[in-house]
Amino acid sequence: MQETFFDIPEDTIREALKVVIDVRNHPLLIHCKRGKHRTGCLVGCLRKMQKWSLLSIFDEYHKFAAAKARVSDQRFMELFDASSLKR
């Protein structure tokens, strides 16, 4: 089975993370309108900012993505540089 790749622009994830980490926006519900895995990637990148291990990030991702889990999403999360965003 061939995996379909959707580009998730890193700047889009960065802008969304700025909204997520801003406590003025809490409480917050994160959901995906189109089902193209942006929510899983966003939460994975948030976990990376929170210093979670990649193993824990991927475990949580698989728990919620189940059959929709994609290697490309994990690669995106793994390569995402969270160090430029401040908490």
Image (cartoon, rainbow, N blue to C red):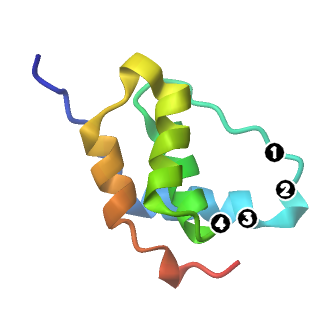
Residue carrying label 4: 18
Which three-letter amino acid code belongs to the residue tagged 4? Lys
Pointer 3 with pointer 4, Cβ within 8 A: yes
Pointer 3 with pointer 2, Cβ within 8 A: no
Judge from the rendering whether residue 52 lies leftward or rightward of residue 69; answer left or right.
right
First in residue order: circle 1 vs circle 4: 4
Residue carrying label 3: 21
Q: Quadrant of the C terminus?
A: bottom right
Asked which secondary structure carries label 2, the reply is helix
Which three-letter amino acid code belongs to the residue tagged 1? Leu
Pointer 1 with pointer 2, Cβ within 8 A: yes
Few, some or many residues within 10 Å of mark 4 (<14, 14–19, 20+)? some
Mark-to-mark CA distance, 1 and 2: 6 Å
- Name above or below for residue 82 compared with residue 7: below
Task: Pinpoint residue 75: horizontal percent, then vertical percent.
Answer: 28, 52
Name of the residue lying farthest toward the left: 2
Pointer 3 with pointer 1, Cβ within 8 A: no
- Name above or below for residue 40 compared with residue 52: above
**Residue in view at x 59 percent, y 59 percent:** 46
Mark-to-mark CA distance, 3 and 2: 8 Å
Q: Quadrant of the N terminus?
A: top left
**Residue in view at x 41 percent, y 74 percent:** 81
Task: Pinpoint residue 47: horizontal percent, then vertical percent.
Answer: 59, 59
